[in-house]
């Protein structure tokens, strides 16, 4: 059994075949079920929790590295738990958002998850906007304020507000761990390009808006927005893995 699963992981890493990924995930759905049940009773239906845990399981399969010498269940459990915690954090944020934006965020999130499941890559803002009959600007705002891809949105949800990159850290971290956390963040950023490092510095050290950062970098605000979401997603994955 273990050898068969290892062979599947090896084939998936080599080919990136979505069918293989889904086959692996199906064999580990019991983990998603167990972890979803642990969050029951907090105001979210079990079916929603199970769906979220299942999507997190897919992402864990995509990120798992067989060469690290750990069992997948050991890797997947904290990954799925972290995603469920983030899900509850985002639910709290959505309550504070305007109803129209909150509804769009939910629609965008569901569309993105289905698109990734079917195609193996994230859709562009243009593709999302076309599918949902919404403006690209509203889609980007929904992505940022809802927390689908961005980890640093302020509670008021206004685009371009200053944010804290430390919000990308796992939920529940205590204050006395901040020094170690900052070092982990420094290591996670070590191999980023000069452009990415400048973008992070302008947005999170200098507290510039996206428009101001775009002007300094000589690019469009939309390019800054997309780059920021990509960087925050990357750093979150690296920090959670660490």
Image (cartoon, rainbow, N blue to C red):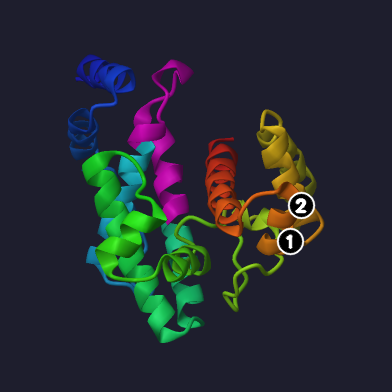
Q: Residue at x 80, y 46 (%)?
A: 179
Q: Main secondary structure of the magenta part?
A: helix
Q: Foreground residue, 2 or 51?
A: 51
Residue 65 painted magenta: yes
Q: Position of residue 35 (x, y in %)?
A: 34, 52
Task: Tell me the residue at 45%/69% (across/down).
Answer: 142
User: In the picture shown, does residue 9 fall above or below 218?
Assistant: above
Tag 1: Cα neighbours inside 10 Å, few (<14), some, or many (≥20)?
some
Report whether residue 43 is seen: no
Decide: marks 2, 1 in contact (CB < 8 A)? Answer: yes
Q: Is residue 40 magenta?
A: no
Residue 176 position in % (x across, y down): 77, 53
Q: Which residues are magenta?
A: 61-83
Label 2's element? helix
Residues 44 and 103: in front is 103
List the residue tagged with mark 2. Answer: 216
What is the distance, in whole Å, between disc 2 and disc 1 at their CAs? Answer: 6 Å
């Amino acid at each position: 059994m273990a050898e068969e699963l290892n062979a599947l992981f090896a084939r998936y890493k080599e080919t990136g075949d979505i069918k293989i990924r889904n086959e692996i995930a199906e064999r580990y759905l019991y983990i998603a079920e167990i972890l979803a049940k642990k969050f029951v009773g907090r105001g979210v239906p079990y079916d929603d929790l199970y769906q979220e845990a299942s999507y997190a399981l897919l992402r864990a399969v995509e990120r798992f590295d067989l060469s690290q010498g750990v069992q997948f269940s050991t890797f997947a459990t904290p990954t799925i738990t972290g995603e469920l915690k983030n899900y509850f954090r985002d639910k709290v944020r959505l309550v504070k958002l305007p109803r129209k934006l909150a509804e769009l965020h939910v629609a965008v999130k569901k569309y993105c998850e289905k698109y990734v499941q079917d195609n193996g890559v994230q859709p562009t803002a243009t593709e999302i906007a076309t599918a949902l009959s919404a403006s690209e600007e509203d889609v980007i705002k929904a992505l940022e304020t809802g927390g689908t891809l961005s980890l640093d949105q302020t509670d008021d949800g206004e685009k371009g507000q200053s944010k804290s990159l430390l919000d990308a850290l796992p939920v529940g971290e205590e204050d006395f761990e901040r020094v170690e956390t900052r070092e982990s963040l420094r290591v996670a950023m070590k191999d980023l390009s000069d452009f990415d490092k400048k973008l992070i510095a302008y947005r999170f050290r200098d507290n510039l808006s996206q428009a101001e950062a775009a002007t300094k970098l000589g690019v469009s605000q939309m390019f800054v927005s997309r780059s920021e979401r990509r960087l925050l997603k990357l750093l979150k994955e690296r920090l959670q893995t660490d």
